[in-house]
Image (cartoon, rainbow, N blue to C red):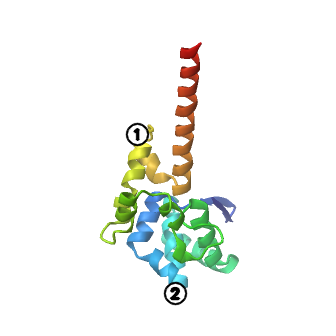
Amino acid sequence: MKVLEYNNKIYYLKLSVKQYIAIHQLGLIERLAEYPTTLDYLSICNILMSEYEFNEDEIYDFMDYIVEEYDIHKLIEELLIDSGIMGENKGNTEVLEESESNLSDDELERHTDVSMTFEEELHPLMRDCLACGMDIDTFYSMTLKELEIYIEGVKERIKRENHDRATLDYA
C-alpha cells in the first residue's frame, strides 16, 4: 500500500480487485505493457482515488501534485507489485505469469482463453474466498496479494484444526 500526503491529509493507495477490473476494462493494463502515456497513468490514479471524495478542482490539483512530486511510472509499478498483479523486478509483460505456473491444465486453458474477461478469470478465486467465509464486498476491496494471503491463512487454520482434532482422536 502506497501512502501519499497531500494538503495535510493522508491517502492510502492500493489496487483492489474492483479497481483492477475497472483499469483492465479500460484497456490500461495492455497499454502499460506497451507505450503508456502520462494520461494512462493519471487515469489509473483517478481510479485509485475514486474511494476518496474529491470535487473536480481537487482531483485535478491532486493529479498535478502527483505528476510534480512522484515518478508516476514508478508509483503505478509499485502499486501493481504491492497488489500482486506484477512480480517484483519484472517487466509489465510478465503480469500474472507467476500465478499461471501454479494452475492445472484446465485452469491454464481457461486463464489463457482470450474470450474470457478478467472477471471470469477471477471466479475460481472468488469461489475460494466465499467458501472461506469472506463476503463479496470484502473480496472486491482487497488486492490479489491480500486475497492469496487470506486463502493461505484459512488453509493453514483448517490444517491446524484438523491436526488438533486428529491428535485428540488419537489420544
In this rendering, position of residue 33 left or right of residue 88: left
- Nearer to the camera, 70 or 58: 70
From where the camera sits, is residue 13 visible?
no
Residue type marked 1: Ala
Residue 131: image tag: 1
Q: Residue at x 50, y 57 (%)?
A: 102
Which percent across, then down, holds residue 154? 53, 38
Above or below for 110 versus 129: below
Which percent across, then down, holds residue 36? 52, 84
- Nearer to the camera, 122 or 156: 156
Residue 104: image tag: none
Secondary structure beneath dot 1 equals: helix
**Quarter of the image that includes the C terminus:** top right
**Quarter of the image that includes the N terminus:** bottom right
Which percent across, then down, holds residue 115? 30, 70
Mark 2 / mark 1, whichever is N-terminal: 2
Q: Residue at x 38, y 52 (%)?
A: 124
- Nearer to the camera, 32 or 157: 157
Which percent across, then down, holds residue 17? 46, 58
Above or below for 160 versus 17: above
Separation of residues labelled 2 and 1 (CA atoms): 40 Å
Residue type marked 2: Tyr
Above or below for 144 versus 72: above
Q: Which residue is mark 2?
A: 35
Q: Residues within 10 Å of mark 1 (few under 14, many from 20)?
A: few
Q: Residue furthest left?
A: 115
